[in-house]
Image: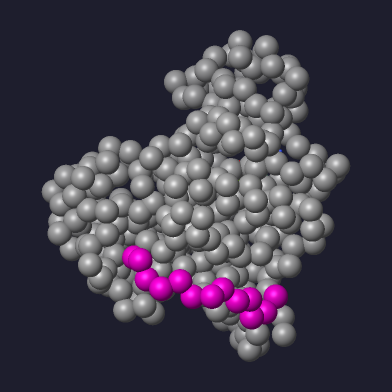
Amino acid sequence: MAITSLGILGGGQLGSLLSSAAKKLNIESVIYTNDKDSPAKNYSDQFIYGKFDDENKINEFLDKVDLVTFEFENIPINTLNYLSKKKDVKPKPEVNKIVQNRLSEKIFINSNKIKTTDYCEVKELSNLLNNEKLIPGILKTCTMGYDGKGQIRLNNLNNIQNLKIDFTKNYILEKIIDLKKEISIVLTRFGKDDFQIYEPIENIHKNQILRYSKIPANINDEIKSQAKTWASLIAEKLDHIGTLCVEFFIDKNNNLYVNEIAPRVHNSGHLTINAYNVSQFENHIRAVCGLEKLKLKKINDAEMTNIIGKDILEYRNKIFSKNEFFFDYLKKEVKENRKMGHLTKIKY
Ligand code: ADP
Ligand code: MG
């Protein structure tokens, strides 16, 4: 059955850009979000605001769509299971189950003989005190973290009691890597052993928030090929359908580690809109809706800068040259450390 109406869970910048890509493919987008001010309202064909456990609202959403996908992985698993009983959900909820939790995510990655940072599970203070070897480290909540939220850097364990860590939540403690570089691989999986892989993207973070991405990444061929192999193995083992991103660390000795998996389109892949013939968003929609897979072709090298907080005000009045592409997410409220838009520059 041809998909004419695509349901998207989540209404942020990624949902907005997915909606725009759907429009280009003549597919109607229906956003479901628990944030009534979310920006995808400006880009989607239909917009439903409701809590993820509001069965009536969810049913209303289901009635309008042929298929469900999502822009972020942290949707309650019960909601995803409920949806998938009524309509296809792609990627499937089992993918979210693994990736929603940093601990099960790391166990999954390591079980495929792929390297991650050293880490331990933290349920109580003694788990920290017994893992001095992971210091300096970062304590991360197992669930719901993004843009560095839910993370505490621990340079030593002195005065650890004073930090008043909330042990009603579960954490992992990760050893800090002496970073040389961060890269990501964005790919779209259409089916068994059927991939399109974008070239590695080099990323710069500031205060744990992505600031800047570029292609080509300045890395050697060995790392390039290892990163692609690991990212496709991860997508294959998850039996993921659609676009997926794997974030990597490279340390000062050129060791490669998987940092985390985003089973969805990703901020570092925004430059694919202008640098490739098919963007990560369009490819996601093509894969989940069973549309034709076009031959992927890079048109230009590119770099992307995230516009954070009140910087957006200045960009809104700027005049851009013809190799610059400004995206305003039209978020209602300007907040410090909030991603408000981005600028992609292509290089001729
Ligand atoms: P989020 O889910 O918030 O993106 P990440 O685990 O990707 O969380 O952390 C955000 C950023 O913080 C990373 O991209 C990296 O710059 C830095 N960071 C996180 N963990 C480590 C680590 N173990 N060693 C060095 N830097 C880290
Ligand atoms: Mg990250």
Q: Establish if 202 lies above or below 111.
A: below
Identify the main secondary structure in magenta: loop
Left or right of 292 on screen, residue 256? right
Q: Residue at x 64, y 42 (%)?
A: 259
For the C terminus, the image quarter is bottom right
* Residue 337 located left or right of residue 67: right
Q: Please, is residue 343 above or below residue 10 in the view?
A: below
Which quadrant is the N terminus positioned in?
A: bottom left
Which is more toward the observer, 250 or 343? 250
| Magenta extent | 289-301
Residue at left 64%, top 80%? Answer: 299
Q: Position of residue 166 (x, y in %)?
A: 50, 22
> Eyeballing the image, is 22 above or below 319?
above
- The residue depicted at 26 percent of the width and 68 percent of the height is 3
Q: Measured from the top left, where is residue 274 in percent x and y?
A: 58, 77
Residue 64: x and y, percent?
18, 63
> Residue most toward the bottom?
322
Q: Which color scheme is applied?
A: one colour
- Front residue of 85 and 54: 85
- The one nearer the camera, 184 or 330, is 184
Q: Residue furthest front?
A: 193
State which quadrant residue 62 falls in.
bottom left
Residue 101 on the magenta span: no
Question: Residue 213 is drawn in which quadrant?
Answer: bottom right
